[in-house]
Image: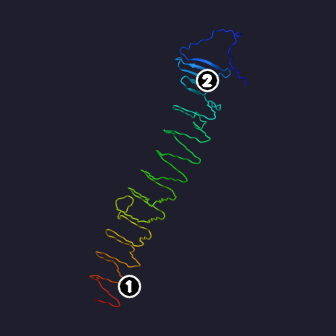
């Protein structure tokens, strides 16, 4: 390729000047000193000095029409300027850099601004592709990331690690996963509104430490509705108590505690069963009350004992002895009194 340079001397024998050269006063205007000018592309390199004789710059101007330039001024600044973008020409107006690596040291603040510049880039203002690890480190300061929407995607594993981690949402916080596991020493959740769990899966609360405990404390009501069976078992004791105070969940408040079932009801202990009340204890049944035991049956009242019936009353022993005994015994009837037996002893 032949390298061509502009002429340094011009012939004066074949040109006859008919008009004088034009002159221009630059007393109040910038002065220019052209160092190099190409006659094919009209590229040039020139110096520029402002009228105050302090604002000077060296400018490397690109081909005519491209409006590209490299500017170095006396303030120590370097500016690179590309030309306008032509939508009919691919790659126009861009700054392309290809290196084997880079190393940058910025002693002051750096400001970067990226604009979309058109509709052909799917609204992307910055696109970075890295074939390897990308490491960012901020020492002794804060890293801010702010956007209308932030989307982070990992094809394998996503890790967030920190001494303290806070996730704050002004509206809804949604998390979804095929499996969700968490491990911590202490866990505390504060909910000032509704706490709802919805799903068809199994829920298990397992504690292996014998010192562990589960406490449910509510200033309001607690409601359990189970469509299947409900089992409550304990190796230790179970205490259920009620003060019978005010509430909103239970409509019938004539009794403080009520246990009902549509079928049979059974309550018993292996060694002993007690039905104890500090006041009066009442056992009633609309279809009848039956007390059955394979051992001895005792009904005892320290103040007194009364057996009444609006119908028949029968005291019967099929195989053993039946006694009616007291310091003073009265047998009376409004009609007849019948005493029968193989032998009757009156003493």
Determine which of the numbered discs, if any, sits on residue 320 in the image: 1
Q: Residues within 10 Å of mark 1 (few under 14, many from 20)?
A: few
Instruction: Identify which residue is drawn at 34% across, 91% down.
Output: 343
Return the residue nearer the eye: 4 or 278: 4
Q: Which residue is mark 2?
A: 60
Q: How is the image coloured?
A: rainbow
Quadrant location, the C terminus: bottom left
Residue 88's place in the image compared with 57, above or below, is: below
Left/right placement of residue 28 relative to residue 5 reads: left
Mark positioned earlier in the residue sequence (2 or 1): 2
Return the residue nearer the eye: 153 or 244: 153
Instruction: Identify which residue is drawn at 57% across, 19% down.
Output: 48
Residue 228's place in the image compared with 48, above or below, is: below
Instruction: Identify which residue is drawn at 57% across, 27% down.
Output: 79
Q: Residues within 10 Å of mark 2 (few under 14, many from 20)?
A: many
State if disc 1 and disc 2 touch (CB < 8 Å). Answer: no
Return the residue nearer the eye: 156 or 339: 156
| Picture quadrant of residue 267 | bottom left
Q: How many marks?
A: 2
Q: Residue furthest bottom?
A: 343
CA distance separating discs 2 and 1:
130 Å
Observer-side mark, 2 or 1, equals: 2
Residue 104's place in the image compared with 228, above or below, is: above
For label 1, the SS is: loop
The percent coordinates of residue 1 (x first, y second) are: 73, 25
Instruction: Identify which residue is drawn at 62% across, 19% down.
Output: 35
The percent coordinates of residue 261 (x first, y second) are: 43, 68
Q: Residue furthest left?
A: 328
């Amino acid at each position: 390729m032949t390298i061509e340079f502009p002429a340094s001397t011009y012939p004066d024998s074949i040109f006859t000047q008919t008009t004088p050269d034009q002159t221009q006063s630059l007393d109040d205007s910038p002065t220019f000193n052209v160092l190099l000018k190409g006659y094919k592309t009209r590229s040039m390199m020139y110096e520029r000095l402002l009228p105050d004789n302090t604002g000077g710059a060296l400018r490397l101007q690109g081909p005519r029409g491209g409006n590209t330039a490299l500017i170095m001024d006396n303030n120590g600044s370097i500016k690179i300027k590309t030309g306008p973008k032509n939508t009919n020409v691919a790659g126009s107006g861009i700054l392309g850099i290809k290196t084997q690596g880079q190393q940058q040291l910025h002693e002051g603040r750096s400001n970067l601004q990226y604009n979309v510049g058109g509709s052909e880039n799917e609204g992307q203002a910055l696109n970075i592709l890295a074939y390897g690890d990308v490491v960012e480190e901020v020492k002794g300061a804060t890293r801010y990331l702010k956007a209308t929407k932030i989307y982070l995607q990992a094809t394998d594993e996503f890790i967030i690690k920190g001494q303290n981690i806070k996730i704050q949402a002004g509206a809804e916080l949604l998390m979804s996963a095929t499996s969700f596991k968490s491990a911590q020493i202490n866990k505390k959740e504060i909910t000032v509104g509704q706490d709802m769990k919805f799903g068809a899966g199994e829920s298990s609360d397992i504690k292996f430490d014998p010192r562990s405990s589960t406490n449910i404390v509510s200033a309001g009501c607690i409601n359990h509705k189970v469509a299947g069976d409900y089992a409550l078992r304990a190796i230790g004791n179970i205490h259920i108590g009620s003060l019978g105070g005010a509430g909103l969940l239970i409509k019938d408040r004539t009794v403080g505690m009520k246990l009902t079932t549509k079928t049979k009801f059974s309550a018993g202990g292996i060694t002993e069963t007690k039905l104890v009340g500090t006041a009066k204890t009442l056992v009633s049944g609309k279809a009848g009350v039956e007390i059955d035991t394979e051992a001895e049956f005792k009904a005892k009242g320290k103040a007194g004992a009364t057996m009444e019936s609006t119908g028949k009353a029968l005291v019967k022993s099929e195989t053993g002895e039946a006694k009616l005994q007291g310091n003073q015994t009265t047998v009376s009837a409004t009609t007849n009194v019948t005493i029968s037996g193989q032998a009757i002893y009156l003493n």
